[in-house]
Image: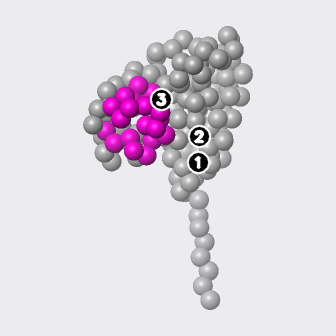
Amino acid sequence: MSSGSVFAQNNAEKFKVSGNCGMCETRIEKAALEVDGVSVADWNKESQMIDVTFDSSKTDIHKVHMAIAKAGHDTQMHKAKDEVYNKLPGCCQYERGALTQATSHEGDDHSTCSHKLEKKDSDHSECTRPNKKKSGSCCNK
């Protein structure tokens, strides 16, 4: 008789997320925590930083960035869609541009990225991660 155990592979990451107030904090943390495998999400209004702990066997940091951007908040990797940002309450509409210096990602493989389904292959305007071509893609996939 043998027994096996699976251990969670917890990773902790810290990154910048744009926001202004307590409502932003609630929205940002909720978006991160809705990603399967994320166990901790704590955003600090003053530093504009989020601490995230996640099980790397269930998710990756890219998915966390994307979930937060889909909620309307720019991250270091992804810019929120203008339509989503514009629907945020007035107090939550932060000054944009500081985090999201989008770069060209032509030639990168975004076949596993959800935003590829919404855009042409060569248009990665939502991606803000520098073109490092890690594992063949700017999204580290």
- Label 1 to label 3: alpha-carbon separation: 19 Å
Pointer 2: what residue? 52
Residue 62 picture location, percent across and down: 48, 40
Q: Residue at x 53, y 24 (%)?
A: 80
Which kind of residue does numbered mark 3 sit on? His
Pointer 1: what residue? 54
State yes or no: residue 126 in magenta. yes
| Mark number displayed over residue 78 | 3
Which kind of residue does numbered mark 1 sit on? Phe
Residue 91 picture location, percent across and down: 68, 12
Of the residues under marks 1 and 3, which one precedes in the sequence? 1
Q: Residue at x 67, y 10 (%)?
A: 90
- Label 2 to label 1: alpha-carbon separation: 6 Å
What's drawn in magenta, residue-wise?
Answer: 108-129
- Label 2 to label 3: alpha-carbon separation: 16 Å
**On screen, 23 above or below 58?**
above
Question: Circle 3: is it few (<14), some (14-19), or many (20+) Cα within 10 Å?
Answer: many
The answer to whether the residue labelled 2 contacts the one labelled 1, judged by CB atoms less than 8 Å apart, is yes
- The residue lying toward the viewer, choosing from 136 and 43, is 136
**Which quarter of the rendering shows the N terminus?**
bottom right
Question: Circle 1: is it few (<14), some (14-19), or many (20+) Cα within 10 Å?
Answer: many
Label 1 SS = strand
Toward the left, the furthest residue is: 107
State yes or no: residue 23 in magenta. no
| Mark number displayed over residue 130 | none
Residue 95 found in image quarter: top right
Relative horizontal placement of residue 2, taking residue 78 as reference (left or right):
right
- The residue lying toward the viewer, choosing from 111 and 6, is 111
Label 3 SS = loop
